[in-house]
């Protein structure tokens, strides 16, 4: 009996399906789930994975990177402060000094470099996957409820699947979607002045940059926020097209989660 000749179509489809499901299966229980692959989520993913934690990032869009790609008003240059430029250099991302305080960086290099850096550190990014709910076990946030974003967009009646986590970081940016679920659906009081979400104030760049880092913290057992989501919860000012606070927030939340998980 002669061997069945290889059918390339079968091999290629099999490779994709098997490898994807291996990845999905081994990430059904993670140390850290990060919702949103914006700059803060990607820096956190990088630092946490580098510390040896099992990190999954869920990004509802096809391309991770969040608000990085568009620079300011689609002018694809990003600005960062000197100390944040150092974080980008760690990822191998080149910056250009602009004056004594600021650097500029090509936004495409920044987005792709942050994505690649997080991935190379060991974080797995599940793109086109929307986190639609959280898991609560005995008063502790314990995971994420996920579905394909196109399923959500088409309002298809399809049940999700669930991934458990020891720590869940809301890196969803301005809407702070995950904290919203905790406050408005689970009815918990988070660590904010009201126990709820105060909402972002208008533009004040310097203050927004400062408070984004200050507001980055654990909000509830098992639940953390980074970047614009953290600032939105605490009612911080909007900072607009400067990204240093986002990078530093990602780094800060990684330090807090590492300490909480004993790393
Ligand atoms: O908004 P985003 O870039 O988050 P960030 O890290 O950075 C904010 C800056 O980009 C910018 C700024 C300048 O400093 O203020 O806005 O706080 O990225 C958030 C990502 O989360 C995804 C969304 O598609 C985006 O890429 N996202 C939002 N909700 C969900 C989600 C969800 N429910 N499930 C999965 N991904």
Image (cartoon, helix red, strand yellow):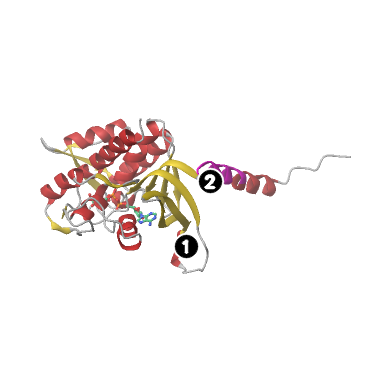
Nearest to N terminus: mark 1 or mark 2: 2
Q: Is mark 1 on a helix, strand or loop?
A: helix
Which residue does the numbered mark 1 point to in the structure image?
Answer: 150
| Residue 198 in the figure: left or right of residue 165 | left
Q: Nearer the viewer, residue 190 or 238?
A: 190
Q: Nearer the viewer, residue 5 or 41?
A: 41
Q: Does the magenta stretch include residue 84?
A: no
Please tell me whether the stretch drawn in magenta is mainly helix, strand or loop.
Answer: helix
Q: Which of 18 and 99 is in front in this view?
A: 18
Q: Residue at x 67, y 49 (%)?
A: 9
Q: Where residue 15 appears, x then y in whole percent?
A: 62, 43
Q: Nearer the viewer, residue 202 or 67?
A: 202
Q: Can residue 208 be seen in this view?
A: yes
Q: Residue at x 17, y 35 (%)?
A: 82
Q: Where residue 94 appears, x then y in whole percent?
A: 28, 35
Q: In this view, does 182 lie above or below 115?
A: below
Q: In this view, does 92 lie above or below 106?
A: above
Tell me if the residue at label 1 has its CB under 8 Å from ligand 1. Answer: no
Q: Where residue 86 appears, x then y in whole percent?
A: 23, 32
Q: Distance between the residues labelled 1 and 2?
A: 18 Å
Q: Where residue 232 appears, x then y in whole percent?
A: 22, 55
Task: Tell me which corner region of the image, top left, top right, bottom left or bottom right, holds residue 85.
Answer: top left
Magenta span: 18-27
- Counting every numbered tag in the picture gives 2
Q: Residue at x 12, y 37 (%)?
A: 101
Q: Residue at x 19, y 53 (%)?
A: 234
| Quadrant of the snapshot with the N terminus | top right
Q: Residue furthest right?
A: 1
- Label 1 neighbour load within 10 Å: few <14, some 14-19, many 20+: some
Q: Is residue 56 above or below residue 236?
A: above
Whether tag 1 and tag 2 are in contact, CB under 8 A, the answer is no
Which residue does the numbered mark 2 point to in the structure image?
Answer: 24
């Amino acid at each position: 009996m002669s061997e069945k000749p290889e059918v390339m179509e079968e091999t290629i489809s099999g490779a994709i399906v098997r490898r994807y499901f291996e990845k999905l299966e081994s990430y059904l229980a993670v140390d850290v789930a990060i919702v949103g692959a914006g700059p803060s989520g990607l820096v956190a993913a990088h630092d946490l994975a580098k510390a040896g934690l099992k990190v999954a990032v869920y990004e509802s869009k096809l391309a991770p990177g969040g608000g990085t790609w568009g620079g300011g008003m689609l002018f694809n240059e990003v600005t960062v402060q000197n100390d944040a430029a150092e974080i980008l250099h760690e990822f191998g991302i080149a910056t250009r000094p602009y004056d004594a305080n600021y650097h500029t960086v090509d936004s495409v290099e920044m987005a792709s470099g942050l994505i690649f850096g997080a991935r190379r550190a060991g974080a797995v990014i599940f793109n086109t996957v929307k986190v639609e709910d959280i898991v609560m076990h005995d008063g502790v946030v314990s995971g994420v409820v996920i579905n394909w974003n196109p399923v959500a967009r088409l309002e298809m009646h399809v049940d999700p699947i669930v991934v458990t986590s020891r720590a869940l970081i809301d890196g969803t940016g301005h809407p702070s979607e995950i904290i919203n679920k905790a406050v408005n659906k689970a009815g918990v009081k988070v660590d904010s002045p009201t126990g709820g979400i105060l909402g972002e104030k208008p533009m004040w760049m310097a203050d927004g940059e400062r408070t984004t880092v200050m507001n980055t913290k654990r909000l509830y057992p098992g639940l953390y926020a980074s970047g614009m989501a953290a600032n939105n919860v605490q009612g911080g000012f909007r900072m607009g097209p400067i990204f240093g606070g986002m990078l530093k927030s990602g780094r800060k939340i990684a330090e807090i989660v590492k300490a909480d998980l004993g790393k």
